[in-house]
Image (tube, rainbow, N blue to C red):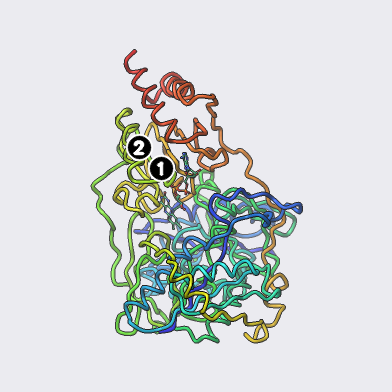
């Protein structure tokens, strides 16, 4: 089975994010980047499926500038077989729909039977690229996948529901799954894996090679526009207890909980 | 022509979900600004009585989309029913609550017209003919004013609690029509085998007066047990956790608080090393008093908190335990 895993590189979780001068995005220089959390689970899922099946190919794909090559390297070091780096400037910018168009073209040209994505990127967080992609490919999809097995040429999929429930279903292949974070442990990259990754093939198909016209993709094709971005207004009424020493702050808090809030 | 705002209604066990009423409240806001019309859509095997209820609560017109295959949710069933209605009525906007169902299904519908979804919105501004939706990118560290510049229909989903449904009318008097929709049964590709509860229900946090919960910021199971445990003991509290704690198996799922765990309503809730992601916060909105301890002053949990201490849990928690014991001794 050929499995295509789509991943995104995002600023690392603890990064200090600063608004850019235009106030419509963040300053990207000087950030540390990592593979988006749920996408790491998508890679892990692909590798596990291949292992269980004892055959197949895991192709990992990312859309992003030169720095995103590092995200591919991580996935290759985990064990993915081959990489696709969508780095052409025409792919840049865009919104979930333009990204889904590009990924759909890749899935078609690769004839991937299964496409795996994370559920949501921790940057813009639109959380819909996998399902848009499924819509474009006219394939069944499952959002928030908690588990998957191949069974008689179909997939048995567990989907997370609200309030601690799950749905189990059978979905025919070819299909698209959005994988939820935390469903099992993601393997680390070993030194051996990192060395092996260096020899793995990474291609950089252009829009023309994928049969995409530039007005459908990237900044030209996008519909969503961020007019402005700002830190949230301090909406809450949090009373910060400020004291140099923890024990002073602690005493003050206990006092307030007893006398003001009357909850202890 | 007056603008139509379509709300796709979600229902469970014969009841309209609260989020859909919030979507109705948002839709009324748009419709009133534009002199437009709110249209509801209820998909089910028998949808009429839910449609009538939605019409009472503020929709001007509600379409009951009926077919035996819609007795339970499948993405392809809903997609077909809703795509057909969109084609028929040509709405300006299609709104839904930002639920698991909406995320599983709505992009399938929107992709057909080349539209992305403005997802998980927390507010809206009317700017002439267009709606500017507010989103919270980068884990709610920012608010982004966002528009869809493409042609109608536009799509948006709304975060739980962002558009209060408290002021909806009780007797709006909207009309109801029932459509027998055509569903291509061969195109229902997801065959649902079972819906089940996961994990044990051995811990019921809903009745606890005081809950102390820890998050990923505790760093390890050992630190979690030590710090959360000692504070919980000092306060006589039950122990809760954020999802990553459960995923890392520091605690069983029965302790998880949030959209995929429990919703709690204690007098006092203490969050240690928890960032305050929306999926966690929806589970604690019923708490009377919230205390947050986090080393990051910008953490969204402080927007929910009554009292906050910015600091390292490893320093603040032992001090807090000591202060509680000191106060008890007096
Ligand atoms: C569909 C879906 C459903 C979900 N359901 C739930 C749910 O039911 N419940 C839930 O909780 N989450 C849920 N999540 C996950 C949610 O989005 C967040 O990822 C999660 O709540 C984050 O947990 P956290 O706050 O413990 O970790 P993080 O977000 O990593 O936050 C850790 C915090 O600890 C602070 N910190 C670190 N070290 C220290 C220290 N030494 N002292 C003090 N503070 C420190 C950091 O500043 C940070 O704010 C769900 C997500 C999805 C996509």
Quarter of the rendering containing residue B239:
top left
Image vertical order of residue A238 relative to residue A17, above or below: above
Image vertical order of residue B14 relative to residue B143, above or below: below
Q: Are marks 1 and 2 on the same chain?
A: yes
Tell me the number on the disc at residue B218. Answer: 1
Q: Residue at x 55, y 48 (%)?
A: B163
Give the letter of the chain under mark 2: B
Mark nearest the camera among 1 and 2 is 1
* Label 1 C-beta lies within 8 Å of the nearest ligand 1 atom: yes
Residue farthest to the top, as pictured? B330
Relative image position of residue A9 (x, y in whole percent): 57, 64
Quarter of the rendering containing residue A192:
bottom left
Quarter of the image with the N terminus of chain B in it: bottom right
Tell me the number on the disc at residue A102. Answer: none
In the rendered structure, are the residues bearing label 1 and label 2 in contact, judged by CB atoms less than 8 Å apart?
Answer: yes
Image vertical order of residue B99 relative to residue A87, above or below: above
Q: Secondary structure at mark 1?
A: helix
Q: Residue at x 61, y 50 (%)?
A: B123
Return the residue at label 2.
B228
Q: Is residue B54 left or right of residue A93?
A: left
Please say whether residue B180 is visible from this viewpoint: no
Q: Nearer the viewer, residue B44 or B330?
A: B330
Relative image position of residue B283 (x, y in whole percent): 41, 45
Give the letter of the chain under mark 1: B
């Amino acid at each position: 089975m050929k499995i295509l895993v789509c991943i995104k590189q995002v600023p690392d979780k603890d990064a200090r994010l600063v608004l850019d001068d235009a106030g419509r995005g963040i300053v990207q220089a000087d950030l540390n980047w990592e593979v988006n959390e749920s996408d790491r689970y998508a890679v892990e899922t692909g590798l596990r499926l291949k292992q269980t099946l004892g055959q197949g190919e895991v192709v990992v794909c990312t859309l992003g500038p030169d720095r995103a090559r590092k995200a591919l390297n991580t996935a290759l070091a985990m064990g993915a077989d081959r990489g696709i780096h969508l780095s052409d400037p025409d792919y840049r910018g865009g919104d979930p729909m333009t990204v889904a168009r590009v990924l759909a073209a890749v899935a078609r040209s690769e004839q991937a039977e299964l496409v795996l994505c994370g559920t949501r990127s921790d940057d813009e967080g639109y959380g819909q690229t996998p399902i848009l992609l499924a819509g474009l490919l006219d394939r069944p999809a499952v959002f928030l996948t908690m588990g998957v097995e191949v069974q008689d040429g179909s997939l048995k999929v567990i989907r997370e529901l609200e309030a601690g429930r799950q749905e189990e279903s059978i979905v025919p292949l070819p299909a698209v799954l959005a994988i939820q974070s935390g469903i099992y442990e993601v393997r680390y990259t070993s030194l051996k894996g990192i060395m092996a990754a260096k020899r793995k093939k990474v291609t950089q198909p252009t829009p023309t090679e994928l049969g995409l016209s530039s007005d459908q993709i990237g900044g030209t094709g996008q519909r969503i526009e961020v007019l402005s971005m700002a830190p949230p207004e301090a909406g809450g009424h949090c009373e910060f207890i400020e004291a140099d020493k923890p024990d002073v702050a602690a005493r003050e808090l206990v006092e307030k909980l007893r006398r003001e809030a009357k909850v202890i | 022509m007056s603008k139509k705002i379509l709300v796709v209604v979600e229902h469970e066990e014969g009841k309209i979900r609260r989020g859909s009423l919030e979507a109705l409240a948002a839709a009324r806001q748009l419709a009133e600004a534009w002199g437009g019309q709110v249209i509801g859509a209820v998909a089910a095997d028998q949808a009429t009585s839910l449609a009538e209820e939605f019409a009472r609560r503020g929709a001007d017109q509600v379409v009951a989309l009926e077919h035996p295959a819609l007795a339970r949710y499948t993405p392809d069933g809903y997609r077909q029913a809703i795509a057909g209605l969109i084609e028929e009525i040509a709405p300006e906007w299609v709104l839904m609550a930002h639920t698991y169902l909406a995320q599983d299904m709505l992009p399938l519908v929107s992709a057909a017209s080349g539209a992305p979804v403005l997802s998980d919105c927390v507010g809206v501004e009317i700017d002439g003919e267009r709606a500017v939706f507010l989103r919270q990118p980068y884990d709610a560290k920012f608010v982004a004013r966002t528009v869809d510049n493409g042609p109608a229909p536009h799509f948006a989903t709304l975060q739980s609690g962002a558009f209060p449904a408290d002021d909806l009318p009780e007797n709006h008097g909207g009309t109801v029509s029932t459509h027998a929709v055509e569903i291509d049964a061969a195109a229902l590709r997801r065959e649902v085998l079972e819906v089940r509860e996961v994990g044990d229900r051995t811990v019921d946090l809903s009745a606890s007066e005081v809950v102390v919960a820890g998050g990923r910021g505790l760093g390890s199971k050992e630190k979690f047990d030590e710090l959360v445990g000692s504070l919980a003991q000092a306060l006589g509290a039950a122990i809760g956790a954020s999802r990553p704690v459960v995923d890392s198996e520091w605690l069983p799922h029965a302790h998880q608080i949030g959209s995929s765990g429990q919703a709690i309503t204690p007098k006092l809730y203490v969050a240690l090393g928890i960032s305050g992601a929306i999926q966690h916060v929806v589970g604690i909105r019923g708490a009377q008093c919230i205390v947050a301890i986090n080393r990051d002053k910008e953490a969204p949990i402080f927007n929910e908190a009554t009292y906050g201490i910015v600091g390292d849990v490893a320093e603040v928690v032992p001090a807090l335990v000591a202060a509680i014991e000191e106060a008890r001794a007096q």
